[in-house]
Each structure stands twice: as C-alpha cells, then as structure tokens.
Amino acid sequence: MSPIVMKFGGTSVADLERINHVADLVAAQAKESKGGVAVIVSAMAGETNRLVSLANEAAGSGLVGETFDDEYDVVVASGEQVTSGLLALALRKRGFRARSWLGWQMPMITNDVHGKARIEDIEGNGFSEAIGSGEIAVVAGFQGRSAEGRITTLGRGGSDTSAVAVAAGLNALRCDIYTDVDGVYTTDPRIVSKARRIDRISYEEMLEMASLGAKVLQTRSVELAMNHGVPIRVLSSFAPAGDENNGTLVCDEDEIMEKQVVSGIAYSRDEAKISLLGVVNHPGAAASIFSRLADANVNVDMIVQADARGPDKANMVFTCTQRDSELAVSVLTDAKEEIGFESVVVDRDVSKVSVIGVGMRSHTGVAKTMFDALSDRGINIQVISTSEIKISVLINSSYTELAVRALHTAYGLDAES
Ligand code: ASP
Ligand code: MG
C-alpha cells in the first residue's frame, strides 16, 4: 500500500504552537493512511536566512555565495534538523511512533555541488521499512549527503524537492505540500484582487509558472514530480480542517477535464535587456556571443536578432537576470574586437510578463488577444518569445501591474465578485 507524503514549509513550523498544529494534521493523516506517512519539514521561518548570514559572516566576504564551502552546508542544514526533532517529539506526545531522519541517515545521496546539490539517489537504509511498519518518518528537508560523506543542501526552497524525491522513492500516492497560501493562483493576488485559486494545473504549466516567478514551489520539485508522475497538492496549513476551497492539484494534463486556453499570468521584474548594436553579421556571430556568455554561466532567456542598416550589420538583443547583466556586459566588452560589434546598451527597467496555458497548443488567436490588450493600454512590447504553451513579452517595468491586470481580464480569468 502506498504511503502519503506531507511537507511543511517554514511558516507552517514557525514556532511550537504551529508545530503542534502540524502534529495534529499529521496525526489525522496517519490514522487514515493505510500505507503510512512520511513528513518533510523546512526550518522554522527566517531560520535559514539567519544561518546563511552567520555562515557568510564567518567565512568573510566572497567565500560564500559564489562558490559554496562544504562547511556552509553544515551550518545552513541545521535548521531542518531542529524542526524534524521537534515534530517527532510532538507526535510521540500524541501517542504515535515517530522518528526523525536526517539527510545523511536515510541517506539522501546528492552530488557534491555544495549550496545547490542535486539528488542522485535515496538509498533507503531501513527508511521505507520503518514507514511500512507504521512509524511516522519525519524527514529533515533541504539536506543530503555527498558520496564523500559530507552534508549537502539543495538550494533555497529545496525542501519541496526533498519532499517530491521522497514521494517518488516511496511511490507515494500523493505529495501534499503545506504552505501559507491555499493553492496556486491565476496570477499574483497582491496585484490582481480578482485572481482565482486554480483547482488543477498540469505539470508543464506549473513548471512555467514556477520558473517565471510564482514562488509557491521550487521549480526543480515540479520537474522531478513531472518526471516521476508524482501528483502534488499545494495547500494551506492555516486553513480550517475540511475546507473544500483549500488546495491546487498539480497533475498530468490528462487528469484535467476542463482545460483553459490560458491558465495563468506570470511576471518577473528581475530582468535586464542587453543590446549589442552593429554586430558584424556573418555565420558564427551568434555562436561567438552566446558561447562566451555560456562559459561565464550567464543564463540567457529571450533572444532577438534583427538586421541593422543593411544586411551586413545586425543588432542582437537578449535578456538575463539583473544580477547576471553586469557580468554579461563585461564578458562581451572584453571580447568586443573578436565578436565585432559597435556598442552595448543595458536596460534594467524591464519586466517580463507571460501568459501560460496548455490550451494554446490547440487554439489560435492567443497571441492576438495578448497584443491587443497591451496596445489598448498603450504598452509597448520590446521583445517577444514563445513556446508551445507560453507567450512572454518584455515591457517597461513601470507597466508591469497594468499589463498583468489587463491580461488577466482579457483571458477571462477574473473571479466573479
Ligand atoms: N529552509 C530552506 C530555505 O529556506 C529550505 C526550504 O525551506 O525549502 O531555503
Ligand atoms: Mg518554500
């Protein structure tokens, strides 16, 4: 019989009162689930930030953040150890058999990229047997162990990924991710008061939403869930028991009866637009630009190339994060002669707004609706990029909210008030 996996984020375990409430939720699930329960916990809210600053301070500037020290992981992983022990104690107090499992005890084997390690395998040192025997496993999220036996962490927000990995490893029925919001919304409710909670969303759409700035789930956890077919339910640990309006199921597209053409609108303000003007246009020009950026680990997103003043010169425009933009400019400036361009211009006053929906594959006119809605508000589109299930535009950042609201209305996503 398949177990259920439950994961609780930082705000859900912020103090002992919250941890006791979580213990009640887990206890109720444990009574119901015939296949047992595994619980993954984050550190108490704010704790990881505190530990990161401590490590930074001890290491001195420059050491942590660029290349992570293995001792950085020893420090920041400790937050999850505390909450796993506290929750196991609270469950024992309620008469349940429960124990904590740290990353190295399971063991959750990762590669040795400290600070952002990737999970390679869960060896399951008696772990699934313990769950099968009816003991509640309380797993410290976010942490693992390298082949060398060192403690690793999975990158910020990584306990979502721990939870999905455990769920995949146990062949769990479902992975319930408890947080402080009651699901995934059609867009950011802080911007659009008529944003609606989505009942079901496909992995692919969720992946786009997560990587485009909807911060409910770590992007990698969605990827992992999609690859292993683990259904995720995102729900609030603050909602009253039995609340029917709690939760969004992230699942296979086939399990969604009513497919929307557009399911959500995402936006990101962390964008910079870099324009290389007067690039000598010959075969290999793009390769010479983007291979240099790749070597410098600059993650390039949108790209457009257009002829400039006749066919032998081109303008190359691309976007990256604001953080990467300085590096991108310096890498390109250093290679100005070899690449062959006239000048480089950076604009950091830009935002990316995207409409996402699997229904786009089979519907026409989705782009037209977007462009009409933006032009009606006098919003100029600087760069466009598309994929099968997404259209993104780059606009001046002062229009971000206006654009998101206009698109939310244009695609009929507004809640009826
Ligand atoms: N505690 C870690 C963080 O704050 C991991 C997590 O909560 O997902 O990033
Ligand atoms: Mg999180």
Image (cartoon, rainbow, N blue to C red):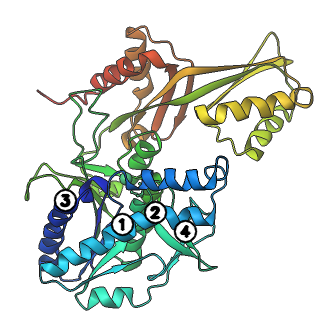
Residue 230's disc is 1
Gap in Å between the C-alphas at discs 1 and 2? Answer: 8 Å
Instruction: Decide: is 111 above or below 51.
Output: below
Gap in Å between the C-alphas at discs 3 and 4? Answer: 27 Å
Question: Residue at point 28% right, 30% down?
Answer: 190
Instruction: Decide: is 67 above or below 139.
Output: above
- The reply to whether the C-beta atoms of the residues labelled 1 and 2 are less than 8 Å apart is yes
Q: Earlier in the sequence, mark 1 or mark 3?
A: 3
Local crowd at mark 2 within 10 Å, few (<14), some, or many (≥20)? some
Q: Earlier in the sequence, mark 4 or mark 2?
A: 4
Local crowd at mark 1 within 10 Å, few (<14), some, or many (≥20)? many
Q: Secondary structure at mark 1?
A: loop
- Amino acid marked by disc 1: Val
Q: Position of residue 397 (x, y in %)?
A: 48, 19
- The reply to whether the C-beta atoms of the residues labelled 3 and 2 are less than 8 Å apart is no
- Amino acid marked by disc 3: Arg
- The reply to whether the C-beta atoms of the residues labelled 3 and 4 are less than 8 Å apart is no
Residue 18's disc is 3
Residue that badge 2 annotates: 224
Judge from the rendering whether residue 105 lies leftward or rightward of residue 6; answer left or right. right
